[in-house]
Amino acid sequence: MNTGKALPIQDNAMETLGGLFRQTRERQRLSLEQIASRTRIQQHHLQALEEEDFASLPAKVFVKGFVRSYARSLGLDEDNAIQLFLTSSSNFYDRTQEEQQHIQVTLQAAHRKRFNWNFVVILFLALGGILFYLLPEQQEPLSPTPESETPLPINETKKEALLESPPPIEESPDSVSSEAPVPTEVQPPSPLPSGITPSPLPPEPQPIAPTFPVSPVAEKTTGTDGTLVLEIEATQLTWVVVQSDDQAPHEALLQPGQKSTWKANTQYLLTLGNAAGVVIRLNGELQGPFGKPGQVVRDIRLKP
């Protein structure tokens, strides 16, 4: 790494950030792979900086960290490089911010419209329920008049016949004896044949005691083969670089709520683009904190 004094940006031909980085790197006869090894920034991100392809880069706060690291590795003035980055990327980030604001306004309008329709539907359902329960109570059914209560016209002759008492009925001894009730014998129930026993009544069902599910007990996250398990969960937008043992580093841009898991045998080496934007656990044990919001922290070594 160049340890001399930072070189100011004075070349009028290098008016853009990408041109400055490319020409300085080529003048020092360095490759993108060598710069990536120095800065621990992925090679395709370095190439995007030289091409000023800001759409292929992560959030603006992380790109500032890339610019400082790249300028430091080439011996350039970091503050001048940041100013040049802000000038070169102003149109892109302004347009991106306008698009995000437009999307947010559209989503809010759609949410309000959906809320209004939901309110109308709920109101109609409530009115329908009220009418359903109130209207049957206001309608009283008409009770029909039974035919037996309807008076029928009766002429005077039939009326006088009905009022006269009927003649007495003479009973003869034969008729009385013929109509006398004849006693009947009550037969007892016949016994069951021998060898046949009555079937017993089924037992009454016993109440069953309610059972309740048992919630599982949370266990620590450890590797089944003795490996180290690293869990990184983002609470904010965070760029992370994870190196497991001596393997090549892996880079990830984690959205809020996103979780990633790695495995290693001995240790991890981390780089965090937003030190306060992640929750880190090693074998289930909480690690950190490692810095403030928006702070880039490198060479975080984790091992048991």
Image (tube, rainbow, N blue to C red):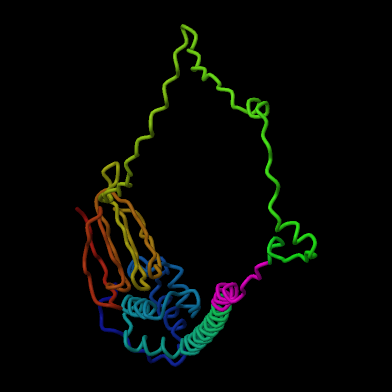
- The answer to whether 8 is drawn above or below residue 231 in the figure is below
Q: Residue lying furthest top in this view?
A: 194
Q: Quadrant of residue 143?
A: bottom right
Q: Total of numbered circles in the picture?
A: 0
The structure residue drawn at horizontal position 60% and vertical position 27%, both measured from the top left corner, is 180
Q: Give the answer, above or below, for where 44 lies relative to 92.
A: above
Image coords of residue 159 (percent x, y): 75, 61
- Seen at 33% across and 64% down, the residue is 233
Determine the image quadrant of residue 272: bottom left
Magenta segment includes 14: no
| Residue depicted at x 51% and y 20% | 186
Near-viewer residue (96 or 83):
96
Q: Position of residue 244 (x, y in %)?
A: 31, 55
Camera-side residue of 176 and 140 = 176
Q: Quadrant of the N terminus?
A: bottom left
From the viewer's side, name the closer residue of 245 and 10: 245
Side of 151 where 138 appears, left or right: left
Classify residue 296 by image quadrant.
bottom left
Question: Which SS type dominates the magenta stretch?
Answer: helix
Q: Is residue 138 magenta?
A: yes
The magenta segment: 126-144
Question: Residue 98's spot in the image, x, y percent?
Answer: 51, 88
Percent coordinates x, y for residue 218 in the rendering: 27, 51
> 279 left or right of 33?
left
